[in-house]
Image: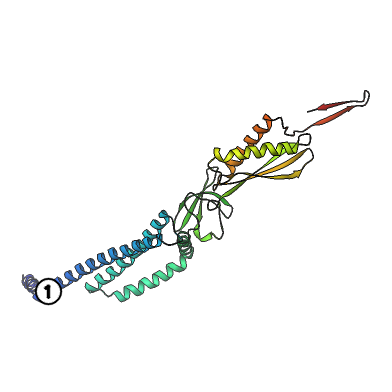
Amino acid sequence: MNWFGDAYDKFTKYLLNEEIWQNIGMGILKIIFILAAASVVIRVGRVIVQNAFRVRTRAPIQLSERRIATISKLLENILTYVVFFIVIVMILGVLGIDTKGLIAGAGVIGLAVGFGAQNLVRDVITGFFILLEDQFSVGDYVRIGHFEGTVEEIGLRTTKIKSWTGEVHIVPNGIIKEVTNFSISNSVAFVDVNISYESDIQEAERIIEQLLDEMPAKYESLIERPQLLGVQQLGASEVTLRVTAEVQPMQHFAMARVMRKEIKLRLDEHGIEVPYPRMVLYNRQGQEKEKVH
């Protein structure tokens, strides 16, 4: 019973020790102050980032709203993580825990992780610069290496590309060396029209020119009136005329199909023959010539 009484006396003295309660109170106040200061720093930092990008939107070279939102959100998250790390270290210091060893250990662990995750770090850095430099956006049609398709998603580590046949290719950002973006500038559609040698080439050109004058009013994807360049090639059984048209990005495939249809129908209306394979047979006995189509 004596040891129990001694323990009780020591615990009572500990609870009644004013210095201990003062230290606990000061520690709590310091922690509250640290948390409040961290909250203020995060809010002020977010406001600074948002205002910086508002100023950026008035610059001569502008980023898209989606890209601005992505980059600003990324910077806000980085700011939050850094502040939280500093807050944790400061709170541990208030609790009397030696943070020097913790920081040194974190440095060693970080170095080991850095050596073991070089590809991950490279992917993240490359993804950040893809977003920052606006190399391509979601919805763009691009060619990256031997992958070609529409960009479905851009992340800091990977980019997802969906081909026209439906496959989704997930490409690590670190291996992206060259990008061909088909959606930035206007596209050019071209159509080769074959005319038989028996047809009047000048009349065919006049009919096609008349059709091309009507097309800009019918199709909004055309940037300007299509151009008939003239004779492109003299084939074995046909004369090839080439027509080109500047269209909105990635509309050249559809417009080329439309122009082929429109030109074919207009030539048919005026009796201009499109060549097709022919074979001529000679009968030696009667010396008669017969055409087989």
State the image coordinates of residue 185 (x, y, percent, origin top left). Answer: 55, 52
Position of 195 with respect to 284 (left or right) is left
Mark 1 Cα within 10 Å, few/some/many (few <14, many 20+)?
few
**Image check: 76 left or right of 144?**
left
Q: Is residue 153 shown left or right of residue 26?
A: right
Q: Residue at x 25, y 64 (%)?
A: 39
Determine whether 50 is above or below 148 in the image: below
Q: Residue at x 67, y 29 (%)?
A: 269
Nearer-the-camera pick, 214 or 291: 214
Q: Residue furthest right?
A: 285
| Residue behind mark 1 | 22
Q: Amino acid at mark 1?
A: Gln
Q: Is residue 147 visible?
A: yes
On screen, 241 above or below 264? Answer: below
Q: Position of residue 176 (x, y in %)?
A: 53, 59
Q: Is residue 112 above or below residue 221?
A: below
